Amino acid sequence: MVMALGALSLSACNEHAKTAADNAPASDTVATAKDEHTQSNADEVTLKHLNLDIAVDFDRKQIAGCATWAINNHKKVSTLKLDTYDLTIDSVYVDGRNSSFLMKGTVLHLGEELDIPIEPATGTVSIYYKTGKNARALQWLDPAQTNGKKFPFLYTQSESIYARSWIPCADGPGIRYTYDARVKVPKGLLALMSADNPQQANDSGIYHFKMDIPIPAYLMALAVGDIKFRPIDARTGVYAESSMIDKARYEFEDVGKMVTTAEQLYGPYRWGRYDAIVLPPGFPIGGMENPKLTFCTPTIIAGDRSLMNLIAHELAHNWSGNLVTNATWNDFWLNEGFTVYFERRITEAMTDKSYADMLWELGYQDFEKAVEDLGKDSKDTWLKLDLKGRDPDDGLTDIPYEKGAAFLKLIENTVGRPRMDSFLKQYFDEHAFKTITTEQFLAYLNEHLIKGDSGIARKLDINAWVYGPGIPANCPRVQPERFKKVDEARTAFLNGTSPETLQTKEWSTNEWLHFLRKMPSPLSQAQMQALDKAFHFTNSGNSEIADLWYTMAIPADYKPAFPAMDKFLSRVGRRKFLEPLYEGMMKNSKQDMAKAIYAKYKQNYHPLAQEDVDAILAGKN
């Protein structure tokens, strides 16, 4: 049994308050754009530095401790306003003295505003708090829910506005600060953060962290568990559960080369180390670009390094997102569109153009589907989003990713790759460690690349991309040569050719995905059986291929795949894979199957994934 850990002492919290202001690294970033998703007043009070002193209690499933903010009350206001979500505030100290505070009523999506009286000269504010049962950032895993089955595990997912559920903070992407932390965990477990990290567990269970580059709250991250480390090269490595570390190390062999390749494209990697942690199966997304430590799904561990493009994406975020950050969630495409473009440039440099072309086409297919799902005239298909009064996660569709990347591809095609690369390198350099709005980027684009050239401006038709719906008429589309052979193979199969005779030996994951995506639905039982016999899709170890196959099996009522699909849903928590399977079951008269499977495995899924599946089963999606 894991013993409970006591909360921090009040004297320790106050000691941090005395020193935080003096020791705070320079970080005077001020929120400059109106952010509808924070109730903080970071535009009036600069949050310079966070000292976090917390204990992780697995028995109570609770984080408790003290957050001390070094502030600059540059507008000399009387109140500091911070974001919280399901936090219990035990006490507050302003410059070391006990203070009153006010928790305002809950606002949908945003949580509870915390108001603290301050003076013009206030230097530090310390908040004693603990997390609640509905902390949306936290997933507490019992040993049975991990890969190793022996120790509990905790990880956070703070994007988009969930940092406020485990730290009282100003929770907006345009608000950056430095931090250091002391984290107490059960002895024998290792703690890691988005900071400088240890590489092995210690005897005390107390770990110290430092992040001396200002970051926004959504990049705050913590993982605690039976975690081991393996180096890749002098500045890269991988963490994973003990039972997964050898597989993870094999899969990540080329990550050091990947970092060097990225630097050759757009300048130096500025974060020191680049490590990644492979999390337990419940992680709800593919990867999260937490600085110095990418969090990633175990679904990329395929045994053949075929799914490492995801790591190229998270690495690219260390330029587009972590280095230059969207100012609000309405500007999300400035993070993800740039990152998808950069990811594909990294991949092309490490493979070849024919491989990258396949990624562009698969991305275009995702773009088409997103427009179909959202509606071709929906404002949610604009690049510049309007998420006022809504959950910012409503904007986490393929639009900012694929439409954003396609817009940058159009710019490249229009001005040429050398000019595009020179522009992007300058953009990253001049905006390093800053935030930017869509309007600021467009002004920069006009000044430094278009430069009054009306011909370029007409070809780009920027307004149609940024403030217009759907797929613009000038959207570039790659026609991969390798997919032409895939299309021929699919046509041959549909015309009766035995799949064993198709020339598929050299196919990559991309070719298999294109082969299956374009199949009519549903296939006949005989067709499903023939494909399965030839290619063993039902028992594929490639999660991308397996998930797509199961989505085909549901409308085809291909029962031989259902036990494997059940097992897949027991060990995968990535929303990208969960949603199409549960939606498919609900839409194809398999509601009882969907509800039975979910009842068995719900607790394996992250709270955010549970919300999504709950909505699907309730018919709200």
Image (cartoon, grey):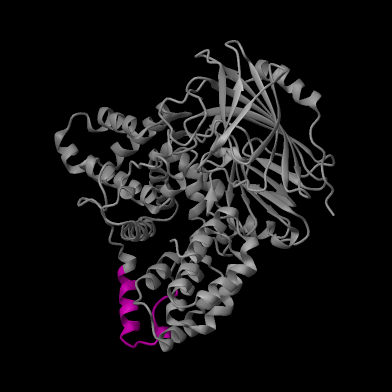
Q: Is residue 244 above or below residue 207?
A: below
Q: Nearer the viewer, residue 318 or 327?
A: 327
Q: Is residue 500 left or right of residue 50?
A: left
Q: Residue at x 53, y 61 (%)?
A: 614
Q: Relative to 355, is 483 above or below?
A: below
Is 214 on the left or on the right of 429, as rendered? right
Furthest toward the front, the residue is: 105
The percent coordinates of residue 363 (x first, y second) are 36, 57
**Image location of residue 615, percent across then percent down:** 49, 60
In the foreground, 285 or 356: 285
Residue occupying image coordinates x 34% and y 66% = 482
Q: Position of residue 436 (x, y in %)?
A: 40, 31
Q: Nearer the viewer, residue 485 or 190?
A: 190
Is residue 170 part of the magenta span, yes or no? no
Question: Along the horizontal axis of the image, is 345 left or right of 255?
Answer: left
**Magenta segment, which residues?**
484-505
**Residue 531 picture quarter:** bottom left
**Please, which residue is most extreme toward the top here?**
121
